[in-house]
Amino acid sequence: MVWCLCGWMFCTHAEAADKRIALLVGHQQGWKGEEHLRHTVTGDLTPLKKALVSVGFRVYMLANRSPETVRKTFRQLSTQKIDTFLFYYSGHAGPKAFHIGPRRAGQPFTYQEFQRLFVQTIRASRRIAVIDACFGSRLLRMFKKNRIILKGPRRRVRRNLIKVLQPTIGKTRGVQLIVSSQIHAFEDQKRRSSIFTHYMLEGIRGKRAADADQDGSITVAEIFRYAGKRFQQETGEEPSFFDYTIKSVTPYGLVPAYNSSLYVNARTTGTLSISVGNFIWSQFKPKGRSYRLRVVSGRGKIRLKRGNRCYMQDIHFPKEREITLRNKWTTSPCDTRWLRKKGLFLQPRYETLMDRAPQWSLSLLSGYTGWLSDTRENHAAFVDLSASWNHILSLGVLFSRGGAHNIVASEGSWFDITQLHLRLGLQFSQEIGAVFRYGIGLYAMGGIFLQHAQAGDASSPSLGGGLQVSASFRLHTSLRLLILGRGGIHWLPLTQGSGLSFQGHAGIGIAWDL
C-alpha cells in the first residue's frame, strides 16, 4: 500500500578539507486533507541521518518542526563556511510550497524562499538538495530558469543564478537538485519508508550497483540514476535531476564504494592513513594481528606514523582485488596538512584476521659475560645471533672469547677461554606506543667450553639457564635497537668444586623484523 506525499532535496559542497553538513527536514502532517505519513521520521529521516553520519556529515534533523524552525536553522547554518551542504525534505508539498505541518502552523515555506536560502544564504561550495515529495517538478523548473529572487527591505531584485554561483579564483561551486517525481511521491507501507528514499539510502550506504563506472566513488549523479531507475520501474513516476556545477575537474565522490582491499600483516604497527581520491581512512594498527582494510580502487598514498616518526609510500588499489602492504617506506615529515587538504576522513571498515605466517625477526648482539665459581673468575666478550618467532620463542648461537683467572693458586694464573653455546629462549613480550617493546622470560643454553693454557688445552661441556629481560626501541619500520640482560646458573665441570656459578650477560645490538 502506498500513500502520496511531497518533497525531498539534496545538496553538496566540497573542497580540499571537506566539511560536510546536512539538514534533514521531514513532517508527517501536511495541510488539510492530506494523509498522515507514518514512516517519515522512522523510515526516512532517522536511517538517512545514520547513513550520512557514517560518511562524514554533521547532521541537523528537524522532525515534525514548524516552518519557522526551518528558517531559523538555515540562518544559523549561514554563519558557517561549509564545503558540502546537503538538504533533504520528506513530507507533503504543493505547487508553490512545502507543506511542513498544518497550514495554521505559520507562514508557508515557499519554493522561492527555499531557493533563496539554499543558494544565497548558505555559504557552501557544493550544494545538493533532494526532495522526496509531490510537485517536485515545480521547484526544479525554478532552478532550470537560472533565476532567483533576492528580497530586500524595499525592493525585489531578480539576479541570474549563474552570477550568484560564479566561483572566486581557485574555488569550485555547484548546485545539484534531485526531485523524486513530477507530481506524486510515494510512501511504502511494507518497507516502512518512502520508496525513493529507500533506494537512495542503498546508494549512500555504498551499494556496489550504484557505482556505475566502478571507480570506487559514488557521485550524486550515480545515486540519482541508481535510485531513479528503480523508483520509476516500481511507481511509473519519473524522477528529475538538475546538475549545475562550475569548474569541476573530476566528479565529486559523495560516498565510497568499497571495491578493493588492503592486507596489513601482523608485524606492521602504528597509525595508518590511506588517501584515495577525496576519501581518507585512518586507523591505528597494533602489532600481533593482521588486518584487512576495505578501500576504494585507484591510486593513492599511505602514511604510517610511529611515535614522532612518519613514513610514506605510493600505492595502487586495483578493482576487485586485494593487495598486500609492502615494506617499501620512505621517511616523510609528520605534517598533517597533506591529509587536511586532501579530503574527507571516514571511519575505516576492517576485519581482524588470523596471522597468515609467523612473525620472524633476527637479532645480532655483542656484549660482556662473566661468572665466578669456587676456584676461578671468568670474563669474555660475546656475540649472539638469534632468530625469534612472534617475539616469544627464540633460538640462537652464542660465541664468547675471553680469559679466566684461577683465584685458588698462590700466584694466580690466566687462561684463554672460548665458548660456543646453543641457546633457547621463551619470553612474554609487549609493545608500547608503537616504538618501545619490552620482554621478560627464561633462557637455557648448552654447548662446549674450551680452555687454552701453557700446561695444555682442555674442553668441557657447559650448561646454563636463568632469567632474561630485553628492551628495544624502533629505529625504522623493520629495524630496532635491542638491549638485553641475562642472569642465571652456569655449570662447568672443568672447574674444581661443584662447577656451579652465577653467570651474567649484558649486550646491545640490533633486531631486524622480517
Image: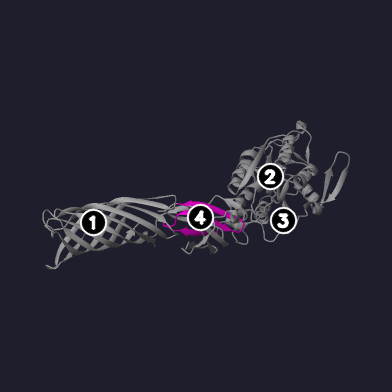
Q: Is residue 478 above or below residue 466?
A: below
Q: Which residue is mark 3?
A: 172
Instruction: Give the camera-side residue of 334 and 256.
Output: 334
Q: Earlier in the sequence, mark 4 or mark 3?
A: 3
Q: Residue at x 14, y 53 (%)?
A: 374
Q: How far apart are the two marked residues, 4 and 3, measured between alpha carbons? A: 30 Å
Expressed as whole percent of the image width and height from the top left, the position of residue 246 reads 74, 57
Q: Which residue is mark 4?
A: 272
Q: Which residue is mark 1?
A: 370
Q: Disc 4 marks which amino acid?
A: Leu
Q: Residue at x 75, y 57 (%)?
A: 169
Instruction: Give the camera-side residue of 358 and 143.
Output: 358
Q: How far apart are the two marked residues, 2 and 3, measured between alpha carbons? A: 35 Å
Closer to the eye: label 2 or 3: 3
Expressed as whole percent of the image width and height from the top left, the position of residue 247 reads 73, 59
Secondary element under disc 3, as helix, strand or loop, is loop
Q: Which residue is mark 2?
A: 186
Q: Is residue 41 magenta?
A: no
Secondary element under disc 1, as helix, strand or loop, is strand
Secondary element under disc 4, as helix, strand or loop, is strand
Residue 79 seen from this side: yes
**Image: magenta residue range:** 259-285
Residue 238 seen from this side: no
Q: Earlier in the sequence, mark 4 or mark 2?
A: 2
Magenta stretch secondary structure, dominant: strand
